[in-house]
Image (cartoon, grey):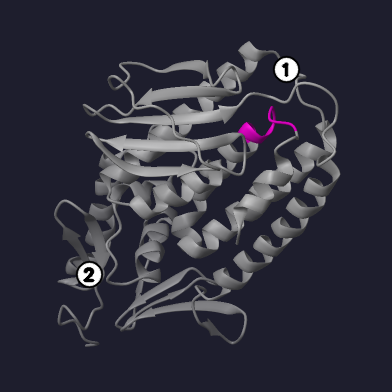
Amino acid sequence: MNLNGINAAVKGGSKDVDILVVRTALVYLLAVEARMGKAAALALTLGITLIGGAVALALLGRGGAGEFEAFRDRSLDYVAAFAEAAAGWLAEGERGTLEDAARFMLLGSAVLVEVVWRGEEVVREGRGDLSPPALAAPPSGARAATVEGGEFLEVLYPLGDEGSYVRVWLEVPFQGGRSPWAPIAVGILAFLGMGALGGSVYLARGRRPSTAGGTRALIEVGSLTIDEGSKEVRLCGRTVKLSPKQYALLVLLAREPGRVFSDREILRELWPDSRYANSKDVKQYVYLLRRRLGEVMPGAEALIATVPGFGYKLLSPEEIGLTER
């Protein structure tokens, strides 16, 4: 998809609301990626971003409604949220996800997104031919100031590591009457948003586990079976009784057996709304799940393998020598 046409269409529209729209999309991308897969998550997030932008333009259609200080504060919050996510992606080596998120930002007020990690520029996405000057030194704290005669707001945010920071240029809100491009932009964004949402549904269907009887999803990893309809787990023909959280952990691992799940991914799936859950909670529930499996069948603790420094993965009973007996 050529995003330049979309960006040109919305250039004259409202810039006060799209910060909230794109920030929400970035957070939502994190929440659904593990559940739906990266491609479907990106399609869904893109659809929400585009439709949200269409709604914002249709309702507000006029720039300059908010004062500059309010815009500056929102911009700092916006870049701070992106920087926090960027630091996590870089630490986990997920540079592709970071690049996708940077491109999403260009659908809003952002015209330039630059990420420098330990002195090396790892991401640079922008509209047009912008060539911002190099920084004299990495920022020691978050700051925002207008550049290019007040046309853009430059926001700098450190990432913690020495020589690491995020640099974003945002268009200052439109001053004046309604942009003549706004009605066209509403139609374009709404049409493309609906298409992206449809694509996300199609991609998500490809990740659904097989079904038994047409209505009850059944996950099979060798002789380990999970009936998502009845919440019943059987190992080599034996029933395994689990708590809801233990069950959720097993289902997550079983949907992609052999794939290593990091603590961050498990936390995102099992404790999506908790501010206090951490890696200790992950370790505790891995331990409890292993213990329960071992109580049902000695040696079954090895079904959940630890990959030091990376996370956990699920093996099939056959891989660890368990058979029905």
Q: State the image quarter where residue 324 is shown.
A: bottom left
Q: Which residue occupies 56% across, 71% down?
A: 203
> Is 19 in the magenta?
yes
Q: Which badge, 1 or 2, comes first in the chain's sequence?
A: 1
Q: Position of residue 71 (x, y in %)?
A: 63, 19
Image spot of residue 41 (x, y percent): 53, 58
Q: Give the image location of residue 115, x and y in percent.
A: 36, 37
Tell me whether the residue at label 1 lies in contact with that at label 2, contact meaning CB atoms closer than 8 angstroms: no
Give the amino acid type for the residue marked by disc 2 in the picture: Leu
325 to the left or right of 97: left
> Does the magenta portion include 206?
no
In this orientation, does residue 281 appear? Answer: no
| Residue 63 percent across, percent down from the top left | 76, 25
Q: Nearer the viewer, residue 139 or 50?
A: 139
The answer to which of 151 and 249 lies nearer the viewer is 151
Residue 240 appears in the figure: yes
Q: Residue at x 82, y 48 (%)?
A: 184
Secondary structure beneath disc 1? loop
Q: Which residue is mark 1?
A: 66
Task: Give the residue number, with chain letter if any, for mark 2.
Answer: 303
Crowd rating for badge 2 (residues with CA inside 10 Å; few <14, some 14–19, many 20+): many
Badge 1: residue crowd in 10 Å (few <14, some 14–19, many ≥20): few
Q: Which residues are magenta?
A: 14-20
